[in-house]
Amino acid sequence: MNMVGRADMKIGFIGLGNVGGKLAGSLIRNGHDVTVRDLDAALVAEYVSRGAKEAASPAALGEAVDVIITCLPSPAASAAVAEGEDGFLAVMRPGQVWMEMSTTDYAEVLRLGPLVEARGGLFMECPVSGGCHRADTGNISIFAAGPREGFERVLPVLTTLGRRVLHTGDWGTASQLKVMTNFLCTAHLVALAEALTVCKAMGLDMNTTYEAIRISSGNSFVHETESQVILNGSRDINFTMDLVSKDVGLFDKIAKETGVPVEMSPLIVRLFKEGEATFGSREFSPNIIRRYEEPVGIKVLGTGFPDQMVDDEPEERGYEVVPKR
């Protein structure tokens, strides 16, 4: 029986980190029956206080729900909750759904999908893009890969979790597109770090510099979000250098597999690996700007900018984005 989209559908969510916790919060806020699992007991307690149920293990969660959602920091973490001791894969039943929302290796997606199908379940990869602030308000974008029939089954859940939902094709395509977009936003973050530091060193007013970029052909989503927390000084986007290294590394791996002689992605991989070594793996990723600030003894700051990114777009039901042909 297809339970997806029914009012009595039960959803399990594994991974209550920076992105996952906000996605789970959208489900709870919109009245879904949600069971959660995370290694951090304090996070689990927080979501239980907001109306979720708690599962003692991934397997226990799998036995209790119709849809399993994972949002975890690495392919290894996803494999562990699915296939490890007390993993949910061993208890999956026909008709059950696993939605993998982690940013992962497309080859791992191609390995896991058939394992779910062998148990009669539906596997969909559904990574997100747009930042933690949009995950928090249900306005994040979602790439979904898997059979078209499966996409239509999970679309009611996806349009609660996100605003713009794109069916990208077969398994693997969503992960490939996701790491490509993360590469692009990281490339612009590095370019902004250099540009802002040079402007500061020239003595330009940083609030005026921000507006000059915003109204120009040099503008981007990254500038309108991450530049604000850079100029505030918090540099807090709930995303860290080790995660950037992982994501851009996945894109660089794909580039090498295709034989395309890319030059920017190996450079960005190196910059963030060096950033991890110098500033710490868990340092906020916008602090790559310290690589440019510190040698010249300046701090790139403006006035009146927020310490965290805020989504000012009102929450609305999501919809499918259909590519032009």
Image (cartoon, rainbow, N blue to C red):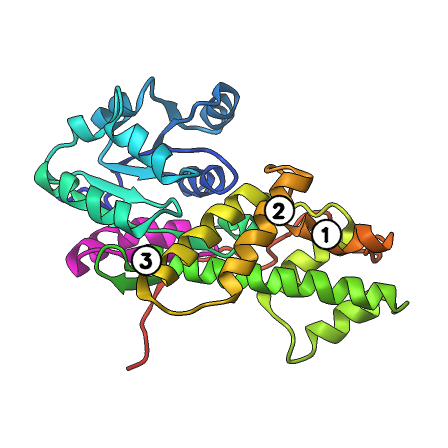
Distance of label 2 from label 3 (alpha carbons): 29 Å
Give residue 54's position: percent from left, percent from top: 37, 22
Q: Amino acid at mark 2?
A: Glu
- Please state if 276 lies on the left or on the right of 323 as rendered: right
Instruction: Find disc 1 in the rendering and name its residue.
Output: 291
Give residue 217's position: percent from left, percent from top: 64, 80
**Residue 158 forms part of the magenta stretch:** yes
Q: Amino acid at mark 3?
A: Ala
Whether residue 115 is visible: yes
Q: Amino acid at mark 1?
A: Arg
Instruction: Find disc 3 in the rendering and name its residue.
Output: 174
- Please state if 159 lies on the left or on the right of 19 as rendered: left
Q: Magenta part of the protein: which range?
A: 139-162
Instruction: Find disc 2 in the rendering and name its residue.
Output: 274
- Please state if 112 lies on the left or on the right of 256 as rendered: left
Q: Nearer the viewer, residue 168 or 5?
A: 168
